[in-house]
Image (spheres, grey):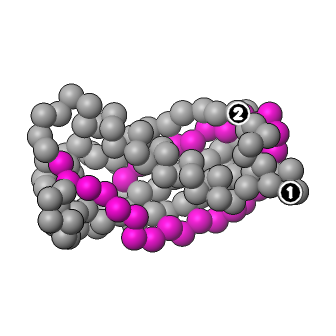
Amino acid sequence: MSKTYEYDLQVKNKHLDDLDHVNNVQYLQWVQDIAILHWKTLIEKETFSYGIWVVRRHEIDYKRPAKLDEWLTIKTYVSLTKDFISHRIVNIYFKETMSLVVQCKTQWIYLNAKTMKLETIPKRIIQLFN
C-alpha cells in the first residue's frame, strides 16, 4: 500500500456554511491542502527537479456533516500511478469515532515544469509513493 499522510484539525467558524455544517468547498480545499502537504513531505529531502501536479478531476462523496469545534482526521494516499496520471484518495473522519465524513478520489496529471505539457511520471516519483 502507498505511504499515507494524515493530520488532525478542528472545525472553525470560517469553515461553516449557512446550515452550520462544514461547507462543501471547504472540504475540497482540505483535499487539495493535504495532497500538497503530502507531496512536500515526500520530496523535502530530494534534490531532483520535479514537474508539476495539476488536478484533472475530483469525485467527492459527503457521508456525514461536520460541525463547529468537532475534530477531524484527514488521511491521504496515492492509490495508482500510471503513465501521466495519479489517483489520490483523501478520507476525512471524525477523529473520536473514525466515522467517515467525506471521501474524495482525485485524479492528478503530471506536467513538465518548463513546457507545461503532459509527461510520464518518473519511476523516482512512483517509488516515493510506495
- Where does the magenta region start and end? 50-78
- Farthest-out residue, right: 19
* Mark toward the viewer: 2 or 1: 1
Assign the C terminus to one quadrant of the image.
top left
Residue at mark 2: 10
Residue 23 left/right relative to 128: right
* Magenta segment includes 10: no
Q: Is residue 105 above or below residue 69?
A: below
Residue 3 in the image: x percent, y percent? 35, 41
Can residue 81 be seen here? The reply is no
Residue 122 in the image: x percent, y percent? 13, 55
- Look at 49% across and 63% down and name the residue there: 105
**58 and 114: which one is in front?**
114
Secondary element at tag 2: strand
* Magenta segment includes 55: yes
Residue 124 in the image: x percent, y percent? 14, 47
Residue at mark 1: 18
> For the residue marked with disc 1, what is the amino acid?
Asp
Circle nearer the N terminus (2, 1): 2
Secondary element at tag 1: loop
